[in-house]
Image (spheres, coloured by chain):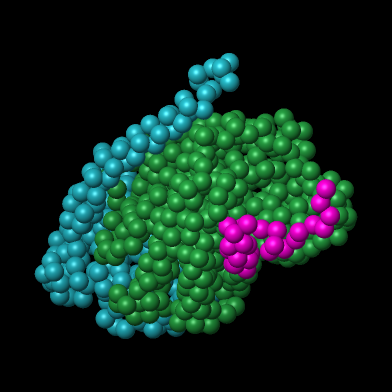
Amino acid sequence: MSNVPWWASESFWRKTAIWVTAGMTLVLIALTFDTVKVITAGHSRVPAYEVINKRIYYRMNTKRKFQEPVIGEDAPLFGKMLSPEEAEAMVSHGKMTVQAKNCGSCHTLLGNGAYYAPDLTKAWLDPAWAGESVRETLMVQFLLDPTTNARGFGSTRRMPNLHLTEEEARAVVAFLKWTSAIDTTGFPRNFTPVAQEGDL
Amino acid sequence: MSTAKITGIAALDGGQRLAVKYFAVAIVLFGAQILFGLLAGFQYLSPDFLYGVVDFSVNRMVHINAMIVWMLFGFIGSIYWLIEDESGTEVVGLWLGNLAFWLFTIAVVIVVVVYLVIQTGPGQIESIWFINEGREYIEAPRWADVGIVVCLLIFFYNVAATFMKGRWSGIAGVLVLDLVAVAGMYLTGMFYSPNLSMDQFWWWWVIHLWVEATWEVLVGCIMAWGLIKTLGARRQIVTTWLYIEVALMLGSGILGLGHHYFWIGTPEYWLTVGGFFSALEPVPLVAMVVHAVYDSGVHRFKSPNHPALAWLIAHAFGNFFGAGVWGFMHTLPQVNIYTHGTQWSASHGHFAFFGAYATMNIAVFYIAAQRWRGNVNFGGGLVDNGWKWKWALGLLNGGVVGMTMALLVSGYDQVFIERALEGATWSGFFKAQQNVWYLQGMWWRQIFGYMTLAGFFLLVWDLMTIGVRETRPAVFPTEVAEHAA
């Protein structure tokens, strides 16, 4: 026992394990305080909920060298400007619906979820919705009857009818519009958005 | 000196009697995991299969939830299995442990029935409390979350109080501290936020800090005890290795959490922090391989329980390749920006969960089976030459590795077509899903899934029959013990 060098001894590694764990935990806690502040809605990287009243562009930032959401002029969702409280309630209802309908067991959001159906992070900006003027109407129609309005692009894979109410469908669209404005540090890479009026 | 061997429940101590209940449920859930995985896999090939009846979302949810819960049941059972031996005293609150077992099991049955029958609810908080929470891996409704935390706290009390009453060891110390973290981390997933970034930030505290930190430490403890039991490895060496693994595991894994914070709205310093520390995460897994192979070599693979030893070694390699290598392959942000959220993740997930955790649980099942059969020889020269456990080992490992490779082929194809060529749009997604190479990968995944199912049936058959006709007593290696005072 006495001829075990210090660096191979049980007590040395016990202390090392404790100090390393404690140190890393403290660093994580410090970074968590900063991150939670930054990802609070309305801060620099995560939009305020009333962003659903605005047009959302997706443009290349030559300094950062990737695309990022850019908030534009007024473009109220379903033609109605909402107060911050109303916007938050609508986005929250959409998020709650996404959870209650278990959307993440087929789709991904911010890349997390299941891989059976397309990622929803930039669904609001996806060219699948033909153009900006008809997008919100088509999205609601799709959510209310996804079997008939299937968007499989040649695949026979279809979304099941999850029996959303019209209010839930509109709220999901609001949630997806808000989600598309999150700064995802360029993910997904090279995303090609829907043609945007006034785009550069 | 002994005459008749004692078998069955009579051969077990109190903790072990509780452990076999956990093992029985774990095996049923393992079967459910494979079954619902096969149903979900088949829906990739034939999307109309069970469409509108039991949709992919339901099958996939049951598949991954059964996996999480059978891992937990296996871990809890494993700890109850070893605790009286390790602490040198009886479990202090066995009746509480039994109560928690039944609560947990009944809750699991109710949750699965609700998943299958009710499936989804309206977009209201009541759905999240009583139907499903809609967050990957922790879809269990909130009432069940509360139940899980209560059961984990009872489990923690039993483990800590038993060691306090009996004797402490290095393994015991690491285990008790780790269980504080296992229970604590789960709490971070139990709230609702409309903010998706905030939601996912804390959700990863549960998923990552369970799976890539606290669970790894937990299986490290079980591995340490298992090597002492199956090989007679020296406690001091095993304990020192455990501390090294904890230092490396938590030294890399805690901030390795950052590799989930690349693209969810979190600040860009996570690219550096997450990339660097997650790149170090394979290091402790290399240490575990070295440790297992070293100990096995030193003892010339002499063990009275060959299937348990084989699964322990499968764990060491499965953990390294599945969690370590497959994780490393797409952990750097430069790669992950293309691969995140594709079949690459599925490939990694299958190999890692099986390699790191399923293998360890199965090793303990064999340790338990040996005692159940009256400590007969599970080493060389089994009555039937041990063909069932060998084939089960081969089919299960071959099946999972096969699925991993097949999903990786599909993943590569998806990344090239959907992400690199098509600009990550919905049409790009479906173009990739219909590509012939992607579909070939999915077919092969299904075939290897059937192989895994065959291995599962053989495993169950073997666990029910191994050693029944064996009469030679096992000659256990004598541990060069120096229990901490």
Residue B67, horizontal then vertical, whole percent: 55, 62
Q: Is residue B148 magenta?
A: no
Q: Residue at x 49, y 68 (%)?
A: B99
The residue lying at 31 percent from left, 37 percent from top is: A27
Observer able to see residue A65: no
Q: In screen coordinates, is B348 left or right of B447?
A: left
In this picture, residue B357 sits left or right of residue B100: right
Give the drawing colour for chain A. cyan
**Placement of B58 over or under B416, stated as above or below:** below
Instruction: Between residue B391 and residue B91, name the one nearer to us.
Output: B91
Looking at the rendering, the stretch of residues picked out in magenta corresponds to B1-29
Residue A153 lies, with reference to residue B340, above or below; the image says below
- Residue at figure coordinates x 24%, y 49% from the top left: A36
Q: Please say whether residue B2 is one of the residues in the magenta stretch.
A: yes
Q: Quadrant of residue B384?
A: bottom right
Q: Is residue B160 left or right of residue A182?
A: right
As drawn, A34 above or below A58: above
Q: Main secondary structure of the magenta part?
A: helix
Across and down, in percent, residue B66 comes to 54, 66
Query: How many discs mark residues in the rendered view?
Result: 0
Instruction: Specify the colour of chain B.
Output: green
